[in-house]
Image (spheres, rainbow, N blue to C red):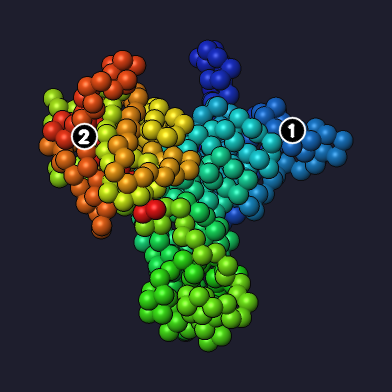
Amino acid sequence: MASENNYDWQSSKNTVLERNTHMFDNIFMSDITLTCADSSRVFHAHKYVLGTSSAVFYAMFYGDMAEKGSDIHLPDTDEESLQEFLRFLYTDDSTMTWSVALKVMYLSKKYLIPSLSKRCRDVLQHTLFETHINVVAVLTILEQAVDENDLRLKCWDLVDNETKIFASSEAFNEISLETLNELLSRETLTGDELEMLQVVFRWSGKQCLKNGLDQTGENRRGMLGDAIYNIRFLAMSREDFFQHVSTSGLLTTEECAGILQRFDGTHGPNLKWTTHAPRQRAGLLSFTRFDFRDSEEETLWGHGQEVDIIVFTVNKPVRFHGVQLFGDANGSDYDVVFNMDGAENFQGRFRSHLREDGISTFNVFLPEPVHIEANKKIRIWAEIRGPESLLSMGGKNSVQCNDIVMRFFDLDADDALWKIYSIFPIGMTFWGPFYKILVTPA
């Protein structure tokens, strides 16, 4: 806290902002103090600054029902958050971590300060697109930023694209039942139903422990409530259901019998589980043309005016979901216009993340999967704008995942794309920005 009252200090401050900054938490000319929960610290403030920043403070100090006191206690915030809240009102600046930004955003909305809400939002968005995925931050934003639809959509996009990373984290066991239910309701998770079941087992077990209960199937079911009806038991194989669910105690004997009857083609009793279809991205397969990468500076892939293209076939019908492209190790943004035969072009801005395999990439998922027939040549191409990215070399001419074989080809010499674009000819022996092709069996 500043308490300086030197004569003519004002003349050393050249702007209103500098003079206001000088008055931040300054007892000099202070006519209001603020305190908060779990702290003895007293913040010295000025009604004029607070009143000109917030209509709520103006009403408190100068309105018809103005309060006469000179002390305000805020039981719904903490010391660091209150400090950054006031700092912004005096300086138009703040130093916030993502966790503080969530709390300050609450204050900014409570006191109707939209410019501060925007600053908090910017901090949170930057956190979402750091080089390393911050699982705790993403899940906490989902839990607390309930009225921030755009932020929540970005968080869910990350969870969709990296379901295994989130689902395997310890932080995931701390989410609320509402968030778990929202997760299980999503169509675009990149996990199959057996993986979702393991998520449910871990989460419900943790809730049992927190409530002092044994981890029995019945107690787990009690923790889950109606969220259990969003587990797609009917999208599992009969063998997986019998082995992992029927003996778990999650379902009653009657429920297990009814589901097994559905597997066998008979209807039996009415069930609350009606969805047979797997999630859109369940069983996602990634076809990688490269065994290694070369990230030496002189061999980084530059994104200029060329369009990068791959031609491939599959031996069985698949649903094409998207691609994983190389990024850089700095968490940079890339603007991508993605095209493929049989689909409208799709564009967006994506940020590079460092993956578990030590490679920095970003996923480009189509809004809806595209059906690809067996043995039909498909061209996918991308216009990429951004800094130089990593690359791989020595691409294979075919890759197999399970019983699906993907073969890669050079672009035909008479292909019309040669005339439309200045295309760098990416073939199986060329370098390029395409790391993985993401499909599910049709």
Callout 2: SS? strand
- Binning the other alpha carbons within 10 Å of mark 1 as few (below 14), some (14 to 19) or many (20 upward) gives some
Please tell me whether residue 402 is drawn above or below residue 428 in the rendered image. below
Closest to the observer: 5 or 207? 207
Residue drawn at 43 percent across, 65 percent down: 193
In whole angstroms, how far apart are the C-alphas of marks 1 and 2? 64 Å
Residue drawn at 31 percent across, 51 percent down: 316
Closest to the observer: 336 or 346? 346
Q: Where is residue 104 in the image (x, y as percent from the top left)?
A: 57, 42
Q: Would residue 48 be found to the left or right of residue 280 on screen?
A: right
Q: Is residue 136 visible?
A: no
Of the two numbered discs 1 and 2 on the same chain, state the one appearing first in sequence: 1
Q: What residue type is labelled 2?
A: Phe
- Binning the other alpha carbons within 10 Å of mark 2 as few (below 14), some (14 to 19) or many (20 upward) gives some
Mark 1 or 2: the one toward you: 2
Q: Would residue 80 be found to the left or right of residue 170 on screen?
A: right
Q: Mark 1 points at which residue?
A: 55
Q: What residue type is labelled 1?
A: Ala
Disc number at residue 409? 2
